[in-house]
């Protein structure tokens, strides 16, 4: 994800206004600058409802999970966890399947892996709770799920520390 954030995508304009929502998704070339929201406090909402299948951090066998995997019904709506701008939509990292990256301002980013039926495009402004895709499956599991990451700058942070407690 770091390369998508800093390497293969152009730098973000600091003062440009985000584009308004569009009703028909279209492909936007990665050479077009994406405006970043200016301020964000780091509080997110759950992007889907479902059990956490795999938590954040190091797991048996030395595997590292930079986010959480949430079990869902295939085709469930994936919502933007906070207001932001779509920075990336694509499949350049096979382990994530179809990946959506949202920039939220102040260096915060959320990532949504294993997405299907994408409803947003690069550069589009989104609001908290807006459907950005439908859930799909992991390339490594037949069980439908969402891989969800939160990053502050280039550093992955535990999403559970930034999501509201579930009742």
Image (spheres, rainbow, N blue to C red):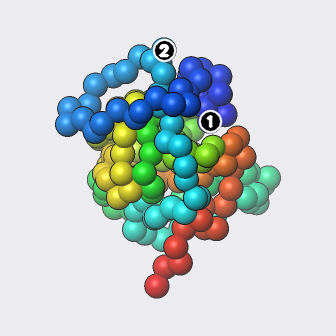
**Residue found 41% across the figure and 16% down from its top:** 29
Q: Between marks 1 and 2, how big is the CA–CA gap? A: 18 Å
Q: Is residue 131 above or below residue 154?
A: below
Task: Give how far across and how far down residue 120 sits, in percent.
Answer: 32, 38
Query: Which image quadrant for residue 98?
Result: top left
Mark 1 vs 2, N-terminal side: 1
Residue 31: mark in rendering: 2
Q: Residue furthest left?
A: 23
Instruction: Select label 1 or label 2 by which is in front.
Output: 2
Task: Give how far across and how far down residue 8 sits, in percent.
Answer: 59, 20
The foreground one among 165 and 93 is 165
Q: Is residue 116 visible?
A: no
**Residue found 48% across the figure and 14% down from its top:** 31
Mark 2: few/some/many CA within 10 Å (<14, 14-19, 20+):
few
Q: Is residue 8 visible?
A: yes
The foreground one among 134 and 62 is 134
Q: Is residue 148 above or below residue 163?
A: above
Q: Which residue is mark 1?
A: 1
Task: Give how far across and how far down residue 35 sits, in percent.
Answer: 47, 31
């Amino acid at each position: 994800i770091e390369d998508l954030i800093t390497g293969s995508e152009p730098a973000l304009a600091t003062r440009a206004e985000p584009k308004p929502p569009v009703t028909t998704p279209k492909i936007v070339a990665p050479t077009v600058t994406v405006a970043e929201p200016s301020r964000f406090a780091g509080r997110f909402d759950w992007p889907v409802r479902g059990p956490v299948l795999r938590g954040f951090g190091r797991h048996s066998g030395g595997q590292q999970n930079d986010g959480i995997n949430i079990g869902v019904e295939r085709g469930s709506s994936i919502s933007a966890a906070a207001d932001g701008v779509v920075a990336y939509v694509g499949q350049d990292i096979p382990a994530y399947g179809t990946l959506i990256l949202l920039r939220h301002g102040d260096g915060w980013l959320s990532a949504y892996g294993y997405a299907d039926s994408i409803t947003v495009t690069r550069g589009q402004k989104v609001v908290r709770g807006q459907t950005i895709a439908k859930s799909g499956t992991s390339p490594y599991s037949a069980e439908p799920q969402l891989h969800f990451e939160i990053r502050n700058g280039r550093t992955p942070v535990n999403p559970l520390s930034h999501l509201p407690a579930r009742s």
